[in-house]
Image: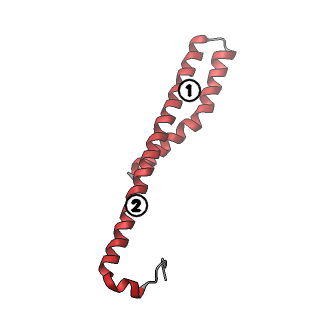
Amino acid sequence: MLAASMVFGTLWMVPIAVMPLAIGAAIDSGITGGDTARLLTWIAVVLVLGLVQAVSVGALEYAGTVVWVHSATTMQRAVLRHAALVGAALPAKVRTGDVAR
């Protein structure tokens, strides 16, 4: 899932970098050049870039949440396993509220 986060993070950043180029090309070839067909093509490119960005940020948030929940669960299991191993001696070794010594 970590690799998926990296891929979705990259997919999220690429449209941010390419969007100004696409808008500039739309202005140069479509508006200044007066070519409506090229303007509509660049508008479609900008919309597709926005769609890629929206989908990838959603997938990035999902993957990040999955990784966070997995790590929190792993930490809880490790702490509980250790507490179960120490057992009744735990209150004698650690005061209530102590996290680390």
Mark 2 neighbour class, 10 Å CA radius: few under 14, some 14 to 19, many 20 or more: few
Q: Along the horizontal axis of the image, is 9 left or right of 74?
A: right
Callout 1 crowding tier (Cα within 10 Å): few <14, some 14–19, many ≥20: many
Residue type beneath disc 1: Val
Q: Is residue 32 left or right of residue 16?
A: right
Q: Cβ–Cβ below 8 Å for labels 1 and 2?
A: no
- Check the image and report above or below for 41 versus 95: above
Q: Position of residue 6 (x, y in %)?
A: 45, 49
Residue 31 position (above or below residue 19): above
Q: Which mark is residue 46?
A: 1
User: How many marks can you see?
Assistant: 2
Residue occupying image coordinates x 32% and y 73%: 81
Q: Which mark is residue 77?
A: none
Residue drawn 51% across the image and 40% down it: 12
State the residue in front, 65 or 88: 88
Mark 2: amino acid? Ser
**Percent x, y for residue 28?**
66, 21
For marks 1 and 2, give the CA distance: 37 Å
Asked where in the image residue 7 lies, by quadrant, the reply is top left
The residue at which mark 2 appears reads as 71
> With respect to residue 35, does 54 lie above or below?
below
Residue occupying the far bottom of the picture: 92
Q: Position of residue 27 (x, y in %)?
A: 66, 21
Q: Earlier in the sequence, mark 1 or mark 2?
A: 1
Q: Residue 5: x, y in percent?
A: 44, 48
- Foreground disc of the pair 1, 2: 2
